[in-house]
Image (tube, rainbow, N blue to C red):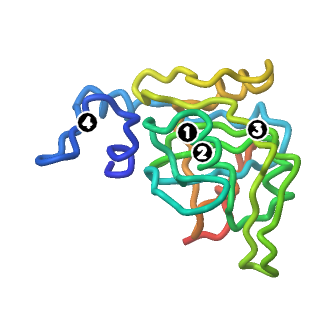
Amino acid sequence: MKKLMSTGAVPGVRDTGRQVFPLAALQQLATRPAADLTALGASEVAVLRVSAPARVEEPEREWIGFGTTLDQDQLLAALSGWWRCDPARVAAGGVLPVTVAGFVVAVLSGLEEWESDGTVGTRARYRFPAARLAGYLTDLTAPANAADPVGADDARLAEMLLGTRLPSVSSGPIAYVATRPTASTSTDEEE
């Protein structure tokens, strides 16, 4: 709840003084459907799990994380890298849903290209310089795409994913989720 409260994505939240999460919003979120990933062409999709925006001092961005106070350019920069991941595996999914507390709040596409930070091995971090913000929310209780998608595919992905539940388990910000139902949930780097 605290992650959601600090992003600004739930209207009526008061996080100063006595913290308040509106009951109507809680009831709406409790009935939110799970993301239907079966329409995606890949067998798995990477999921970027983030918190509220935090300031960073980097040449390409001022923020990391998700927040409704960030404009579209700041949000894209905050979400498009530097993550420890398997970049080819992320790109193979064709889409990168961004979640806060298990809810999809943004969707990235255009992941075909990546850059490394130059670190070797499992410590390497990658960013996706051609990533596009296919969609993002400003109100999780009434999900509507606040972005202007580049094309029909981006609009379709955003429509399909924004505001849905997408649970994932990982020891880092990137998790991998199977797109087809199986007997057991497939994730990477379980906690």
Of residues 189 and 65, which is closer to you in this image? 65
Q: Is residue 120 left or right of residue 64?
A: right
Q: Is residue 176 above or below residue 66?
A: below
N-terminal of the pair, mark 4 or mark 1, is 4
Q: Which residue is mark 2?
A: 98
Number of residues whose C-alpha sits closer than 10 Å to that of mark 2, classed few (under 14), some (14–19) or many (20 or more) = many
Q: Amino acid at mark 2?
A: Val
State the mark number for residue 104.
Answer: 1
User: Are the residues flagged by discs 4 and 1 in contact, CB closer than 8 Å?
Assistant: no
User: Are the residues flagged by discs 3 and 2 in contact, CB closer than 8 Å?
Assistant: no
Q: Amino acid at mark 1?
A: Val
Please name which of the two marks, 3 or 1, marks the residue nearer to the observer: 3
Alpha carbon separation for disc pair 3 and 2:
11 Å
Q: Which residue is mark 3?
A: 109
Of residues 112 and 58, which is closer to you in this image? 58
Of residues 55 and 96, which is closer to you in this image? 55
Q: Which residue is mark 4?
A: 13
Classify mark 4: helix, strand or loop. Answer: loop
N-terminal of the pair, mark 1 or mark 2, is 2
Please name which of the two marks, 4 or 1, marks the residue nearer to the observer: 4
Alpha carbon separation for disc pair 2 and 4:
21 Å
